[in-house]
Image (cartoon, helix red, strand yellow):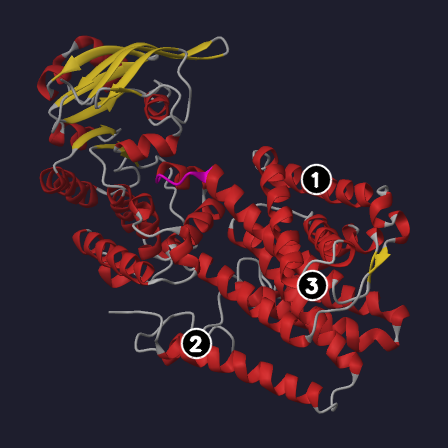
Amino acid sequence: MRNWFNRQNIVALLGIVLLYAVVQGLIVFDIMPPFYKLTLIQICIYIILATSLNLINGITGQFSIGHAGFMAVGAYISAIITAIQHGPLLVGLLGGAIVAALAGFLVGLPTLRLKGDYLAIATLGFGEIVRIIFLNTEYVGGAAGFTLPSKITWTWAFALMAISVVLMKNFVGSTHGRACISIRENEIAAESMGVNTTKYKVMAFTMGAFFAGLAGGIYANYFYIIQPMTFNFLLSFNILVMIVLGGLGSMTGGILGAIVMTLASALLAGVPEWRNIITAVLLVLMMIFRPTGILGTKEFSLSFLGKKGDKNAASKN
Amino acid sequence: MPLLKIDNLSKSFGGLKAVSNLNIEINEGELIGLIGPNGAGKTTVFNLLTGVYDKTEGKISFLDKELSGLKPYQVTQLGMARTFQNIRLFSDLSVIENVKIAYHQRTSYSLASALLRLPSYYVGEDEMQRKAMDLLKIFKLEDKAEETAKNLPYGEQRRLEIARALGTEPKLLLLDEPAAGMNPQETQDLMNLIRWIREHFKLTILLIEHDMSLVMGVCERIYVLDYGMIIAEGAPDEIKSNPKVIEAYLGEEVV
């Protein structure tokens, strides 16, 4: 009988724990410069954002570009809970994520009837509406935003990132994830195979919004300050670029894209005038020579450790 | 009581009456053909049955249930599955994943156990894998289970589409031109396959076909559609000699 305790899962778990311990050690013994720590936490936030957007765009094939809007909802709600109401951090983060999921559900129900470009425009509009609502709300400081204590540590950021990624990966690897993929592949055929396409589109959208809200909460409780300007459409595009770079429809590709883009932007921080040009040129080259993204729709997996061979095992070579 | 009863069904697209006053009755276990010249409205009938189109008038009852207003996935869940004239596989997925998606509606585990990888997830996935493999064996596709669907030869793609439809465990199977693009030998094999799956799965089959040898060879009863209306109904031999049918459709082929 197959169960959770197989070699693949155990190796993955050990890898995750080891990665955490090494970085934590470097932080505790003050070896790691603060800038690196900041970059690592940023990477965690962007990994959650990229994989959750991938759930909507890459897996279910619904082109959404309003992810910054859901992130903003999560950021503001969690900041209100932790800073203004003085609630515990975990309650704030979960509260932000749940309200973002609710927003995703309410926005998803009507807009997911739209296809392609129309859906993109509707979600883009949603993102801007959210930003403008916060911009005009005095309670959260309007355009100036508001400050809050930084409570997120590397442990928080990494643990939440790892849990989010595992949950999303589990979703994609189940029959529910396959139903979403079938919608991307051929919506008419999916429907005729008994897949309730509306339900699964809304489910993916809600789940994506939940994790975007969680990432927003981590962001707000780490960076001391949140302002509406942070969550503009450029942020949505940035997340989109990450998953296109890594491979639309590949969860591990999204993670890779988030790491590459965040590192590139950190490494080029010394030459800000060149930063956008270099990333743009890289993306153009990418689109010419490998338009499917680094991993395409394949997944990097540890299945070569198991007994049964998997065709995707060697996809990252 | 018939399995499927179509009563005075009509469908208009603006001023065009694609189907008018259609009456069809199919009993359990029958193998029925629906033929007609190009543009006669055959695929429209399938789309009306499976809920892709809303009907303008009339009634469709399947297993004593009225089908009006049901979405395609609900019709499939009631036990009616179809294939498409222009193959609609999940072409970038593997062969076995195509079949597993058909088993989705009978999933035994919940979303929560999928997310948390509870034991019921592994039980459910193993069962799905086994069922899908069994079905692929019947269609002699088990060696290609991990192949990407779009890389299969044309005939095997057709077979996979039928296998996938059977994965939804239907009572009534609708085949839209299953022999399109096949050579005579492949058509012959397909005839045997259709007869065999009807016996094996205890199915009722309604098929649309242009290939006369296939229709005359396997169907017990045939409906002939022309300009959206039934112009003849009966056994293959009666249809062959019906002057209206010859005029509308068969032309010199049977002479």
Report the residue marked by disc 3.
Answer: A218
Disc 2 residue type (three-letter): Leu
Any part of residue A244 in sight: no
Label 1's element? helix
Q: Nearer the viewer, residue A280 or A55?
A: A55
Q: Nearer the viewer, residue B157 or B130?
A: B130
Left or right of B157? Residue A77 is: right
- Frontmost of labels 1 and 3 is 3
- Frontmost of labels 2 and 3 is 3
Magenta-colored segment: predominant secondary structure:
loop
Q: How many marks?
A: 3
User: Real-space Cα distance between discs 1 and 3?
Assistant: 27 Å
Residue A14 spot, x, y in % from top left: 48, 82
Report the residue marked by disc 2.
Answer: A302
Report the residue marked by disc 1.
Answer: A121
N-terminal of the two: label 1 or label 2? 1
Is A14 contained in the magenta span? no
Q: Magenta residues, as a range?
A: A193-197
User: Real-space Cα distance between discs 1 and 2?
Assistant: 38 Å
Compared with residue B79, is residue A185 higher up or lower down, i.e. above or below? below
Compared with residue A200, is residue A304 higher up or lower down, i.e. above or below? below
Q: Quadrant of residue A262?
A: bottom right
N-terminal of the two: label 1 or label 3? 1
Same chain? Circles 1 and 3: yes
Left or right of A93? Residue B175 is: left
Residue A171 spot, x, y in % from top left: 45, 57
Same chain? Circles 1 and 2: yes
Same chain? Circles 2 and 3: yes
Can you say which quadrant of the picture contains the N terminus of chain B?
A: top left
Q: Assess disc 1: are there few (<14), some (14-19) or many (≥20) residues with their C-alpha within 10 Å of its C-alpha.
A: some
Label 2's element? loop
Q: Assess disc 2: are there few (<14), some (14-19) or many (≥20) residues with their C-alpha within 10 Å of its C-alpha.
A: some
